[in-house]
Image (cartoon, grey):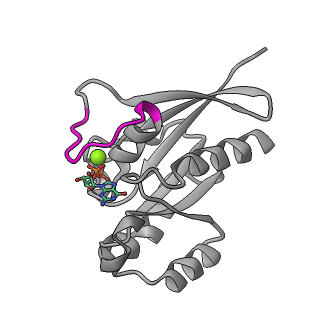
Amino acid sequence: DVEVAIKVVVVGNGAVGKSSMIQRYCKGIFTKDYKKTIGVDFLERQISVRNEDVRLMLWDTAGQEEFDAITKAYYRGAQACAIVFSTVDRDSFEAVEKWRSKECGGIPMVLVQNKIDLIDQAVVQVEEAESLAKKLRLKFYRTSVKEDLNVNDVFMYLSERYLEI
Ligand code: GDP
Ligand code: MG
């Protein structure tokens, strides 16, 4: 059995919950102020997808969300990409297309609206998020890393899409 390894990059504006999502998915925990461990580029998790063993390497941006600050090494060899915005951060929603046009073309990609536990304070309407996903032809998930809602689905979808190629 040859194991499949997939490099997944998680992009989006600062504070949308990327690091928290990676930590939640790989370590099963949520903390209010997660600090990236210095020297660690990614966290990993092994899952089974259609009877295949898949090792997901989830790359974190180390807080370098300023566009040009993200190094080429971050994107190099990326095989799947999650673009994340926050329910309570309008700018992060409006930045989605810019993130999409970054260097990860031609790989499985997904759009993620995080922090849906804060739906009472939403500054992005469900319909506009859905129509953006449609326009960009991206599968769309709504997650709460805090409440552990739909996070697994995001990475299962990317894995399945990757295996289809
Ligand atoms: P990053 O800059 O995109 O990596 O974002 P972080 O993972 O550092 O998260 C920024 C803040 O949002 C932290 O205080 C997290 O605890 C919080 N956060 C992340 N996900 C959620 C969520 O689903 N719901 C809520 N309410 N807060 C979240
Ligand atoms: Mg972070």
In the rendered image, which quarter contains the C terminus?
top right
- Locate residue 73 relative to residue 128 in the image: left or right: left
Magenta: main secondary structure: loop
Identify the residue shown where x is 30% and y is 78%: 121
In reply to whether residue 124 is colored magenta, the answer given is: no
Where, by quadrant of the figure, is residue 136 drawn? bottom right
Task: Say whether residue 101 is visible.
Answer: no
Measuring 51% from the left and 53% from the top, which residue is drawn there? 82
| Residue 33 on image: x %, y % | 19, 45
25 relative to 54 in the view: left or right: left
**Range covered by the magenta-colored residues:** 26-36
Q: As drawn, which residue projects farthest toward the top?
A: 1
> What quarter of the picture does the N terminus occupy?
top right
Q: Whole-percent x and y of residue 149?
A: 49, 55
> Residue 12's spot in the image, x, y percent?
38, 58
93 w.r.t. 60: above or below: below
Q: Position of residue 63 (x, y in %)?
A: 25, 47
Q: Is residue 29 above or below residue 65?
A: above
- Within the magenta stretch, is there residue 27? yes
| Vertical arrangement, residue 65 with respect to residue 36, above or below | below
Q: Nearer the viewer, residue 132 or 100?
A: 132
Q: Residue at x 25, y 35 (%)?
A: 36
Q: Is residue 155 visible?
A: yes
